[in-house]
Image (spheres, rainbow, N blue to C red):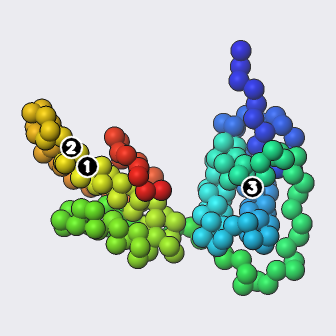
């Protein structure tokens, strides 16, 4: 039995499958709802900037739905189109931007700085220094930080067993290799998630 179609976002009738490609009009409608939520005080500027980027780079309906569900809850997808934002001042809404070269370099640094020996401290510094102003840097810094916290925890716990002693250096070598891969991925404006990582920090 085929899966039931999931409604895409507020203002549209149920029907399109989550994996169908979205149009520019689809993205624009979600952008307007995100701006309206910001105008109502339901999102801060950081959250708005992050959601606008996700909306503008969405490829399928499944990419758009998570942006809206926590804003409209059980009313989703019956929410009418948002009111015009003419009353807002031009400076009230940050202009969403694509991630530029500086974002990509800092995102890569969040991974590669660990190679200098600053295993946990390096990604933490990048998170605190640039994570607040760039969702892209924050995303990569969090991944790198959680991975190295996982390696640190494994270093403490694995030596309890004989086989664990053998696995500790393997975990460190794997961490270094994955850090390089993560850095390259960040430079290429891509997403990267470390495998076998306990994500303690969100």
Give the percent coordinates (x, y) of residue 123.
33, 65
The numbered dot on residue 77 is none
Counting other residues with Cα less than 10 Å from the Cα at mark 2, is it few (<14), some (14-19), or many (20 or more)?
few
Q: Residue at x 70, y 46 (%)?
A: 65
Task: Reply above or below: 136 against 175.
Answer: below
Q: Residue at x 69, y 67 (%)?
A: 43
Left or right: residue 199 versus residue 167 is right
The residue under label 3 is 71
Give the percent coordinates (x, y) of residue 146.
36, 54
Foreground mark, 1 or 3, reads: 1
22 or 169: nearer the eye? 169
Q: Residue furthest front?
A: 160
State whether residue 196 appears in this view: yes
Query: Considering the image in quadrants, where does the N terminus appear?
Result: top right
Q: Quadrant of residue 12?
A: top right
Task: Reply above or below: 19 against 125.
Answer: above
The numbered dot on residue 157 is 2
Pointers 2 and 1 in contact (C-beta within 8 Å) = yes
Give the percent coordinates (x, y) of residue 23.
74, 50
Q: Residue at x 81, y 44 (%)?
A: 74
Left or right: residue 74 versus residue 110 is right
Q: Residue at x 75, y 26 (%)?
A: 4
Pointers 1 and 3 in contact (C-beta within 8 Å) = no
Pointers 2 and 3 in contact (C-beta within 8 Å) = no
Which label's residue is closer to the chain start, 2 or 3? Answer: 3
Tag 1, which secondary structure? helix
C-alpha gap between disc 1 and disc 3: 36 Å
The residue under label 1 is 153
């Amino acid at each position: 039995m085929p899966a039931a179609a999931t409604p895409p976002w507020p203002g549209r009738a149920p029907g399109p499958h989550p994996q169908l490609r979205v149009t520019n009009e689809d993205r624009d409608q979600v952008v307007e709802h995100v701006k309206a939520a910001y105008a109502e005080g339901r999102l801060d500027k950081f959250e708005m900037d992050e959601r606008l980027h996700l909306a503008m780079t969405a490829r399928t309906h499944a990419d758009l739905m998570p942006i809206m569900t926590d804003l409209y809850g059980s009313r989703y997808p019956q929410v009418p189109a948002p009111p015009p934002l003419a009353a807002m001042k031009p400076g009230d809404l940050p202009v969403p931007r694509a991630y530029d070269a500086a974002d990509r370099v800092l995102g890569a640094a969040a991974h590669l700085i660990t190679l200098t020996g600053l295993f946990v401290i390096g990604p933490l510094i990048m998170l605190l220094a640039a994570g607040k102003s760039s969702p892209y840097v924050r995303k990569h810094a969090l991944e790198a930080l959680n991975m190295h916290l996982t390696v640190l925890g494994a270093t403490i716990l694995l030596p309890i067993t004989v086989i664990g002693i053998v696995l500790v250096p393997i975990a460190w070598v794997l961490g270094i290799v994955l850090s390089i891969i993560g850095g390259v991925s960040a430079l290429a404006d891509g997403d990267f998630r470390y495998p076998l990582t306990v994500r303690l920090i969100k």
